[in-house]
Image: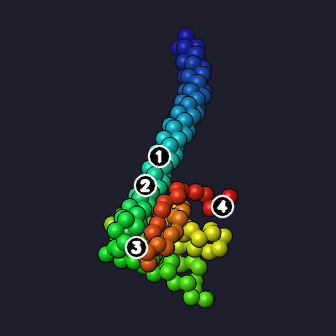
Amino acid sequence: MDVVANKKKRQLNKSFSRNRGAAMIVVVCVMAVVMILSLTLLMAAYQMLATVNDEGRDELYYQQAMSFSEVLRDRLEAKSLSGSSTDALVNHIDAFMENDNEGAPQKEKLVADAQGVYGKITLDLDRSAMFQGNLVITISVSDEDKVMSSCVCKYEIDNKEGYTTYKFLGYYNHWE
């Protein structure tokens, strides 16, 4: 009887051993699936957060370009009302507009490094014939030589009483 009991016991142990090995494989596979799903969720969350950060940064660049545009507009219009300005940028734009000599440049680029703020600000002044006596100023904000945002302003120019006046005509898309 002992022999029969031992034999049954060995068969039972073999059966459990086989089942334990199969169960271990199933557990490892389930854990791998759970880990893959967790990593996928983590990557999706990271991607959404990165996108939100990029959109926030783009908005900051756009706001910087628009703020600079509004300040420049205020200064040009104030100069137009008073007839003179102590602002170096406005005086530079005046000199650019009043230079009617043959061969005078029709376009000019001014670059200012915005220390402590996002990016570098570039002003492209254009008084070429295609704008029919108007001044077009493109304000670009760039970071590491890549333009992040830009704003295009158009001004009507009038020379009255010996000085240049500027009337803001609006923002426009110069690629049309």
Label 3 and label 2: CA atoms lie apart by 21 Å
Query: Helix or strand or loop: what does disc 4 sit on?
Result: loop
Calculate the distance from the C-alpha at mark 1 to the C-alpha at mark 3: 37 Å
Residues under numbered marks 1 and 3 in contact, where contact means CB atoms less than 8 Å apart: no
Give me the disc on residue 96.
Answer: none
Badge nearest the viewer, 1 or 3: 3
- Percent x, y for residue 169? 52, 58
Q: Amino acid at mark 4?
A: Trp
The relative height of residue 37 versus residue 63 in the rendered view (above or below) is above
| Residue 118 shows in the view | no
**N-terminal-most mark, 4 or 2:** 2
Residue 175: numbered disc:
4
Q: Would you identify the image quadrant in which residue 11 lies? A: top right
Work out whether residue 77 or residue 54 is closer to the camera in this orientation and state it: 77
The quadrant of the picture occupied by the N terminus is top right
Q: Marks 1 and 4, how far apart in space?
A: 28 Å
> Which mark is first along the chain, 2 or 1?
1
Relative side of 130 to 59, left or right? right
Mark 1 or mark 4, whichever is nearer to me: 4
Residue 90: mark: 3
Q: x%, y% of residue 2? A: 53, 14
